[in-house]
Image (spheres, grey):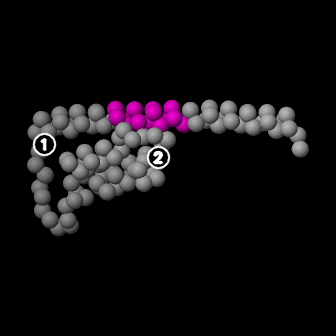
Amino acid sequence: DDDEDEDDDELGGRYGAGMMPGGLSAFEATAATIANRGTFGDDAASNPAGAQNPQRPKTQAQIDRRRDRNRILARRTRLRKKFFFESLQQQVAELERENAMLKEIMRSHPS
């Protein structure tokens, strides 16, 4: 669980212009995190071949905790995605303004 918290901190908050630390996009960072953990935290990925680890049934409290954690992480992911697209929209607007300004300069100063 401590590893998951560190990954969540790395993927959260510091979400400026759509890039994550190390030059990865948020999608690439998330995909890398999932790949490092196995399939969404699947215990089979950390269980060496041949080792016997019979899965015990989960208690209702464990199921509820996991569901709550999933709900929170899903909301955080949706918010990150929303802010990412908002930042892209701002960049597009800035580039369109700059483009219009440059076109106007080219019109007023023919070569």
Q: Which residue is mark 1?
A: 58
- Mark 1 and mark 2 lie on one chain; the one further toward the N terminus is 2
Q: Residues within 10 Å of mark 2 (few under 14, many from 20)?
A: some
Numbered mark located on residue 7 in the image: none
Q: Position of residue 65 (x, y in %)?
A: 18, 36
Q: Position of residue 52 (x, y in %)?
A: 12, 62
Q: Secondary structure at mark 1?
A: loop
Q: Is residue 73 left or right of residue 108?
A: left
Residue at (36%, 38%) from the top-left corner?
13
Residue at (73%, 33%) from the top-left corner?
100
Q: Position of residue 5 (x, y in %)?
A: 25, 45
| Residue 35 magenta | no
Q: Secondary structure at mark 2?
A: loop
* Residue 32 visible in the displayed image: yes
* Residue 27 visible in the displayed image: no
Q: Looking at this view, is 54 or 94 the one in front?
A: 94
Quarter of the picture holding the C terminus: top right
The three-letter amino acid code for the residue at tag 2 is: Met
Q: Position of residue 6 (x, y in %)?
A: 27, 48
> Magenta stretch?
75-89
Residue at (75%, 37%) from the top-left corner?
102
The three-letter amino acid code for the residue at tag 1 is: Lys
Q: Is residue 47 left or right of residue 29?
A: left
Q: Which residue is mark 2?
A: 19
Query: Looking at this rendering, what residue extends furthest in the bottom direction?
Result: 50
Numbered disc in front, either 1 or 2? 2
Q: Magenta-highlighted stretch: main secondary structure?
A: helix
Q: Quadrant of residue 99?
A: top right
